[in-house]
Image (cartoon, rainbow, N blue to C red):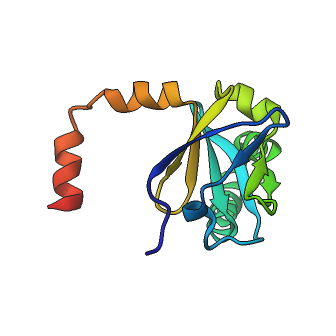
Amino acid sequence: MSGFLGSFRHQIDDKGRLSLPASLRRDASDRPFVLVQVHASALTLYPESTWKEVEGRLRDLLRLNPDARGYVLSVTANAVEVVPDKQGRILVPQRLLTAVAIQDSALLVGVIDRVEIWSPERFDALTAQRPPEFDRFTSQVFG
């Protein structure tokens, strides 16, 4: 099976290391990920191949819209390359943890081609709300 699926709650140790579940790192081995905050409430962990696609879209955005320079700088300035250690942990900078209100534990959520890292409380609050479009989206995706 391809893609990142499921959700996993893991503790963050006192050095800011977060364990990646085996199912999320099985295809990554020693390859780097890019960790970045693109949404206000969560961090996003991109595998190298997916990040290359994002880089291409960022380059295109700059080329087509010079006014996007500030946006691109704000995204890339907070991006960090992380490589899982032998125990499958990544180091998450404290500034990124603080930005999304993650303290002692984090919820890793597979989002098909990337992994989002959430404060468990923020994720629960978001998913507890069932938007009016929910049934329409379900029909569009699952028939």
Image quadrant in which you'd find residue 5? bottom left
Q: In this view, does 21 lie above or below 11?
A: below
* In front of the other: 94 or 106: 106
Q: Is residue 123 above or below residue 10?
A: above
119 on left or right of 79: left
- Residue 67 point in image, percent of width and height: 70, 43
- Residue 55 point in image, percent of width and height: 70, 62
Judged from this view, the residue extending furthest toward the right is 15
Image quadrant in which you'd find residue 73? top right
* In front of the other: 89 or 64: 89
Q: In which quarter of the image is the C terminus?
A: bottom left
x 37%, y 33%: residue:
127
Q: Is residue 82 above or below residue 11?
A: below
* In front of the other: 5 or 65: 5
- Residue 103 point in image, percent of width and height: 68, 25
x 47%, y 54%: residue:
111
* In front of the other: 8 or 44: 8
Total of numbered circles in the picture?
0
Q: In which quarter of the image is the N terminus?
A: bottom left
x 75%, y 70%: residue:
31
